[in-house]
Image (cartoon, coloured by chain):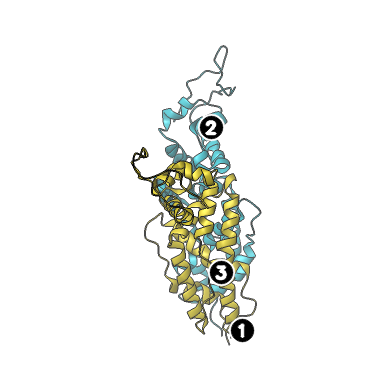
Chain colours: A yellow, B cyan
Amino acid sequence: MIAEARATAGGTARAAEDVVPVRRRGEALESAIYGAALQQLTTDGYAGLTMEGVAAAAQTGKAALYRRWSSKEELVMDALRASLPPAGPAPDTGGLRGDLLELVTRLRTAMFSEPGAAVRAIMGEIDHQRAHAFLALVLERVVEPTTALIAEVLERGAARGEVRPGAVTPMVTDVVPALMLYRIKMCGGGPVELDPAAIVDEVLLPIVRPAGP
Amino acid sequence: MIAEARATAGGTARAAEDVVPVRRRGEALESAIYGAALQQLTTDGYAGLTMEGVAAAAQTGKAALYRRWSSKEELVMDALRASLPPAGPAPDTGGLRGDLLELVTRLRTAMFSEPGAAVRAIMGEIDHQRAHAFLALVLERVVEPTTALIAEVLERGAARGEVRPGAVTPMVTDVVPALMLYRIKMCGGGPVELDPAAIVDEVLLPIVRPAGP
């Protein structure tokens, strides 16, 4: 829980940026701060995010942020924890192709959502020292649930005879997220070709389809 | 061509870092500077690379760098242009599996080479404004030649009947580099599982193998 100390009424000095602090407490303020942090991540990247910038965008004061988070790393970790949605149940359309199409479509939507874009911005800067905590969070909250969903859909397909026995390996369940991140990266912010049907029909289904009769 | 102005002999003031500038001209100095730039990229990333740091590591002066490159972006672009090796001819072992294994092994080696690690470090920071020039260079010098090699090997396999007609699409030729970059990224600097045989036998060969008899 956080609370703002600054009053908004009569005679209160305005912030230098001419921001009018709004009196909010607890979850409402926290949610505004998290939203501002994700937005800064997607537009300026982790390196460009500042406590000042987040405070201004959330219409609060820097002091309100520092009362709760001693660094931008802590703030960003909490913003991600609060914003990344749970993976949800695996699709179950009754057929392998339908399940895979729905799953790939859902993953694409998640990658282009604001928390998804924020995670991609951070992952872009994750090669270096400070970023190990982020990687652990991303593995736990994004990568592992995604891999588990893909494996579940493929295993259900195997039970129906739509997937060759032994076809589902860790390398295979990495193919979809790998292709998506690669294509997004190589487009450098331009339009991305990520047709779920191409991923499913040209790559995933051929990998797993049973050997000929 | 660049030339060092600072003398190294009697009475010359040493640099603050106690670096003794070595008298070199042209290619020798350039090569030392490029080597130092790649090294800084792999250890500190693009954000951490400084003209001062490169000058010190190359045992030259900052002024020698600024005479040739007005910014670290220009220096890094030239260092990459000079260091990225040509793609080389496609492997030709006489069989699809052998060709793919050799190609994937070669790509893995390239990714872990110093220029490969430098490119990965830059690509990590490429989502934002400044990085478009780098992306164009990486596409031209790394991505497109890699994709062309994979397509060549697969098309030769198709001519031998080892690849299903129509199997080789842009999505399919992206699978190998995508998997490699994804696995490297998700290991966060730890050991990476990139067994070429797993990539070839679990993913690539199943994608392209002819439909049953």
Q: Residues within 10 Å of mark 2 (few under 14, many from 20)?
A: some
Q: Secondary structure at mark 2?
A: helix
Query: Do badges 3 and 2 share one subunit?
Result: yes
Quarter of the image for residue B58 reads top right
Q: Which residue is mark 3?
A: B204
Mark yes or no: residue B61 visible.
yes
Q: Residue at x 46, y 47 (%)?
A: A4
**Residue A108, horizontal then vertical, whole percent:** 45, 66
Q: Which residue occupies the foreground of this view, B176 or B160?
A: B176
Q: Which residue is mark 2?
A: B53
Q: Which residue is mark 1?
A: A159
* In this rendering, position of residue B187 left or right of residue B123: right
- Report the Cα–Cα distance between label 1 and label 2: 58 Å
Q: Amino acid at mark 3?
A: Leu
Badge 3 vs badge 2, beta-carbon distance below 8 Å: no
Q: Tell me which chain the residue with mark 3 is part of.
A: B
Q: Is A130 located above or below residue B102 in the figure?
A: above
**Residue A60, horizontal then vertical, whole percent:** 42, 46
- Report the Cα–Cα distance between label 3 and label 2: 43 Å
Q: Which residue occupies the foreground of this view, B45 or A208?
A: B45
Q: Residue at x 49, y 41 (%)?
A: B47
- Report the Cα–Cα distance between label 3 and label 1: 24 Å
**Quarter of the image where the C terminus of chain B is located:** bottom right
**Residue A21, horizontal then vertical, whole percent:** 38, 46
Q: Amino acid at mark 2?
A: Gly
Q: Residues within 10 Å of mark 1 (few under 14, many from 20)?
A: few
Q: Secondary structure at mark 1?
A: helix
* In this rendering, position of residue A111 left or right of residue B195: left
Q: Which residue occupies the foreground of this view, A199 or B103?
A: A199
Nearer the observer: mark 1 or 2; the answer is 1
Badge 3 vs badge 1, beta-carbon distance below 8 Å: no
Q: Amino acid at mark 1?
A: Ala
